Image (cartoon, coloured by chain):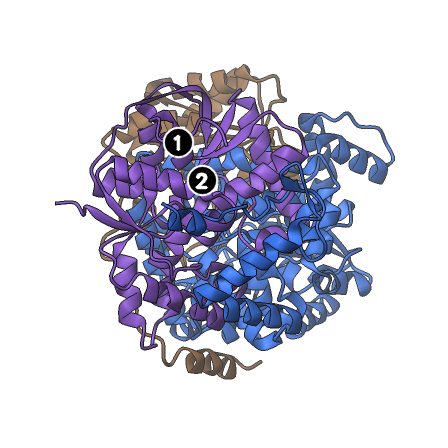
């Protein structure tokens, strides 16, 4: 059906319907910020969704990267997104210390490399303290697959990028409408409860999510 | 000053099938100093037709109740469901008819029994004695249309020897639902069995409710399945505990 | 699909429910799952101003739906400006035909599908399969019911009616290997087999939780990550969106997303909130070349402007299903339609007509638990009641109509009432045994087949009152 005809039909049906106003006051939601400092709250909330976050000073970032990779028995093939370039030196040192195989794929090979990697390493635009969520914004330096295909995802996020609650993400999403095709808010590990309500991590997306909050 | 006079809306179920619940209600109210009368022109609130979609038939019967209760100061009923019909639905049922005002007036002065005792008379403690374990079923319309949660339980709490044990889901429907219980008998029975299983798990001797519809449905299933659990209306239990009614039927 | 919802919906609810009731394990499995979800819902809202939140959420939905033409127009304009193709489908047929044509143009052989109630509603998969295309559901629960050749039985937990043993057998049989009934192992296995689908699919099809008018964006809520997969990996993404799923701007999503997820699962957010702004931008590394949105009417506009308009406020959280005592006994399949439980009992007759689904409004005891939990305050049980009235007016059931007329004629006056009581008491003698009726003639047999019936008292209350 033509858009105009479709909308005209809707308009006609609604012609006698009174106007309702958008709410002037919205109480705190389950995803709102509270009084706790974001840097304290973020790790607590993320843990509830099966992810782990810790705060590290920049001087110890390399060490922390090596530790995270060492904590898990998984393989050490790491695809690295260009959005962590600001931390290039620390990342490379850490990955080397962990004896990781580092892959920085060219554009056209990202998908194939990510599909076989053990870890994806990316940054994030924002962290949401109230929920432990990360706003990942795909773009030239941030392939979607880096945070999607590998079974484990490591995120390096400067603490300044933390916001208190979901409310603060919305203006950012609005401003991203023309700048990225698919921003995503990721909270913890991929999970399902479809079999008898038993929660299982890692159904399609990463089973492991680690966040290093850099001071 | 709370009203000292009340008209009993006994409901058709209590009148025809469970008259002792009506007697217990009268005994309780009189014991609290309320002068009770029974307008004999009353029959039924009209809910069976209303819930089946036959509003005109519901109105025909309901208008009889408007007439019967015209001069009542307050109307008290031992049923959350029938009270909710009058209070929540009459205004809609009579909307745009000549009886609209009368429906509003009746809705404003009609109360469920435990609600009347606790919220209107301001009596939240009824001393008495009754030995046994009791579990309480929140009848849906009393709970959700009238907002009754603590009134019945609060009154039972004053009874010596009575132990109140909550079932897992006291607020879950028992499956009566008026004509629903006949329209979908197998579903209704499965719902009753769920409720009964929850009640039996508490180890209670008696399941108490403020609605004879729920109790008729549960009683019918309890006796059919030879359960040891007994159904009892909250009015009956309170009257017995206060020595106002014979100890057994 | 073995059972097309339309054919099933024509059967009576009672027949389908009775089939479901014979599955003795059903209430146990469904009860456990729905009780858990309901308990979590209560917990998360316990410390918050839930009445205030519900008022606000209702206001957002009421405002949007009342101005739907404006917001839909804006949504389409912005989405198209960003390169998304927007198609307005008045009917299921138009929607299906659009997707089939697109699939043919792209030469699609394999389609990866994320959970979408709207695509279930228009029976999209069977149509594509008839064209020789393999369509794979990728939400684990949807995948399970697809293998079982069943429709989903819960809005957010499609396989809630299946035990782990049944699921293990299904997956094992389909893939010709043996599997233990361990959810961890079964999930890992599904991850492996579905990963191939994501990477090889020609088209990804998803639903839409919210369309954002201000930016022409789509919001998708998933926990598994399959929503992100089907909208990121295949070269074409098609989203099927019920036309009422719009919000004015992102700002409203900071309320509606948590209300949806918390009402559904008791968590503040799901694992993935994907916001699709359009196809891959020129400088981006990955993402689909084409994004299509099919805006679906399929009976919805008929509901606008009626007393049922607020049913279009629904955000599909499934909370009403979790508390419904009827749903608990018969599961989603009892309703024989895409949407089961209270939301389905209201929506289905409005979408497909009273002739096919006029009995669904009676599939409720009117307990009101659904209305109490609905995060956008849809008066579900009141709408069920209103539908019963409208169905009776339209269908004019003869026997029932005569019965209620006879009843109201007698009971409108106390003497008629007393007369009937006396007649009943005289007639019941032959049926009463030991103070109860165990077997009564029709229609009362519908009661006494399973339950005892109390006889009319030897002396009614009003007779006793006279003798006081």
Percent position (x, y) of residue C116?
Answer: 60, 55
C238 is higher (above) or lower (below) than C302? above
Palette colour of chain C: blue
Percent position (x, y) of residue C7?
Answer: 75, 64
From the viewer's side, name the closer residue of C27 and C291.
C27
Compared across the picture, whether C375 is left or right of C161 comes to: left
Quadrant containing the C terminus of chain C is: top left
Compared across the picture, whether C341 is left or right of A168 comes to: right
Palette colour of chain A: brown
Q: Looking at this rendering, what residue extends furthest in the left direction?
A: B1
Q: Report the Cα–Cα distance between label 2 and label 1.
A: 9 Å
Percent position (x, y) of residue A132?
Answer: 39, 33
The chain letter for the residue carrying disc 1 is B
B190 is higher (above) or lower (below) than B89? above
Percent position (x, y) of residue B93?
Answer: 39, 68
Compared across the picture, whether C328 is left or right of A56 comes to: right
The residue labelled by disc 2 is: B20
Q: Secondary structure at mark 2?
A: helix
The chain letter for the residue carrying disc 2 is B
Palette colour of chain B: purple
- Which labelled disc corresponds to residue C332? none
The residue labelled by disc 1 is: B245
Q: Would residue A30 be visible to someone looking at this image? A: no
């Amino acid at each position: 059906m033509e858009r105009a005809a479709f909308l005209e039909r809707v308009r006609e049906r609604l012609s006698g319907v009174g106007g309702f106003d958008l709410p002037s006051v919205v109480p705190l939601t389950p995803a709102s910020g509270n009084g706790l400092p974001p840097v304290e709250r973020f790790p607590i909330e993320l843990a509830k969704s099966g992810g782990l976050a810790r705060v590290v000073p920049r001087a110890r970032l390399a060490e922390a990267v090596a530790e995270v990779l060492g904590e898990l028995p998984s393989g050490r093939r790491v695809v690295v997104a260009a959005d962590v370039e600001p931390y290039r030196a620390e990342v490379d040192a850490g990955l080397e210390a962990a004896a990781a195989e580092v892959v920085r794929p060219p554009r056209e090979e990202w998908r194939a490399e990510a599909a076989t990697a053990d870890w994806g390493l990316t940054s994030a635009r924002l962290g949401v303290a109230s929920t432990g969520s990360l706003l990942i914004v795909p773009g030239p330096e941030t392939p979607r697959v880096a945070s999607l295909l590998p079974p484990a995802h490591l995120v390096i996020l400067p603490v300044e990028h933390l916001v208190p609650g979901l409310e603060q993400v919305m203006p950012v999403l609005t401003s991203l409408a023309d700048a990225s095709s698919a921003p995503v808010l990721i909270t913890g590990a991929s999970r399902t409860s479809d079999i008898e309500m038993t929660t299982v991590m890692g159904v399609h997306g990463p089973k492991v999510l680690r966040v290093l909050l850099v001071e | 000053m709370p009203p000292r006079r009340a008209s009993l809306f006994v409901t058709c179920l209590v009148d025809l099938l469970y008259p002792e619940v009506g007697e217990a209600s009268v005994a309780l109210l009189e014991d609290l100093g309320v002068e009770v009368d029974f307008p004999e022109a009353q029959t039924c609130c009209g809910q069976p037709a209303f819930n089946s979609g036959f509003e005109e038939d519901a109105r025909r019967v309901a208008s009889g109740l408007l007439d019967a209760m015209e001069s009542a100061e307050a109307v008290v009923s031992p049923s959350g469901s029938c009270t909710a019909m009058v209070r929540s639905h009459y205004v809609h049922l009579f909307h745009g008819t000549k009886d609209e005002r009368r429906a509003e007036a009746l809705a404003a002065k009609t109360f469920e029994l435990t609600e009347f005792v606790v919220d209107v008379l301001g009596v939240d403690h009824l001393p008495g004695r009754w030995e046994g374990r009791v579990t309480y079923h929140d009848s849906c319309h009393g709970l959700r249309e009238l907002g009754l949660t603590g009134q019945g339980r609060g009154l039972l709490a004053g009874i010596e020897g009575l132990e109140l044990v909550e079932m897992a889901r006291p607020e879950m429907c028992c499956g009566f639902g008026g004509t629903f219980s006949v329209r979908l008998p197998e579903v209704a029975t499965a719902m009753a069995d769920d409720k009964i299983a929850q009640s039996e798990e508490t180890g209670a001797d008696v399941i108490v409710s403020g609605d004879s519809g729920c109790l008729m449905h549960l009683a019918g299933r309890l006796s059919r399945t030879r359960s040891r659990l007994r159904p009892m209306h909250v009015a009956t239990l309170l009257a017995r505990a206060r020595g106002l009614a014979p100890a057994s039927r | 699909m073995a059972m097309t919802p339309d054919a099933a919906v024509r059967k009576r609810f009672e027949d389908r429910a009775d089939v479901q009731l014979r599955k003795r394990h059903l209430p146990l499995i469904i009860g456990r799952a729905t009780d858990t979800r309901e308990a979590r819902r209560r917990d998360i809202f316990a410390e918050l101003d839930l009445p205030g939140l519900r008022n606000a959420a209702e206001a957002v939905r009421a405002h949007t739906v009342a101005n739907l033409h404006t917001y839909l127009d804006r949504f389409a304009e912005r989405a198209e400006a960003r390169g998304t193709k927007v198609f307005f489908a008045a009917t299921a047929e138009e929607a299906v035909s659009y997707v089939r044509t697109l699939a043919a143009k792209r030469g699609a052989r394999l389609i990866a599908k994320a959970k979408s109630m709207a695509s279930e509603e228009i029976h999209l998969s069977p149509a594509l399969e008839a064209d020789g295309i393999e369509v794979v559901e990728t939400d684990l629960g949807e995948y399970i019911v697809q293998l079982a050749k069943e429709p989903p039985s819960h809005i957010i937990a499609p396989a809630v009616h299946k035990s782990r043993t049944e699921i293990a057998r299904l997956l094992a049989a389909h893939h010709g290997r043996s599997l233990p009934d361990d959810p961890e192992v079964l999930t890992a296995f599904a991850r492996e087999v579905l990963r191939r689908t994501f990477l090889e699919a020609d088209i990804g099809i998803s639903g839409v939780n919210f369309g954002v008018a201000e930016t022409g964006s789509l919001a998708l809520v998933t926990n598994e990550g399959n929503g992100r997969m089907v909208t990121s990996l295949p070269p074409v993404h098609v989203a099927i969106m019920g036309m009422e799923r719009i919000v004015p701007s992102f700002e409203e999503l900071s309320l509606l997303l948590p209300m949806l997820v918390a009402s559904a699962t008791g968590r503040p957010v799901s694992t993935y909130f994907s916001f699709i702004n359009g196809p891959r931008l020129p400088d981006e590394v990955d993402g689909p070349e084409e994004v299509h949105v099919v805006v679906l009417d399929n009976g919805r506009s008929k509901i606008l402007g009626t007393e049922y308009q607020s049913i279009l406020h629904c955000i599909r959280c499934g909370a009403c299903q979790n508390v419904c005592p009827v749903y608990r006994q018969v599961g989603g399949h009892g309703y024989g339609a895409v949407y089961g439980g209270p939301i389905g009992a209201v929506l289905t007759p409005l979408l497909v007509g009273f002739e096919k689904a006029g009995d669904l409004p009676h599939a409720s005891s009117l307990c009101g638990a659904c209305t109490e939990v609905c995060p956008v305050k849809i008066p579900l049980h009141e709408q069920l009641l209103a539908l019963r009235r409208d169905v009776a007016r339209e269908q004019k059931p003869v026997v029932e109509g005569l019965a209620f007329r006879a009843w109201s004629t007698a009971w409108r006056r106390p003497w008629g009432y007393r007369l009937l009581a006396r007649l009943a008491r005289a007639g019941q003698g032959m049926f009463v045994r030991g103070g109860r009726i165990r077997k009564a003639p029709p229609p009362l047999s519908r009661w006494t087949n399973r339950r005892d019936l109390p006889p009319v008292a030897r002396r009614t209350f009003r007779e006793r009152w006279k003798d006081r």
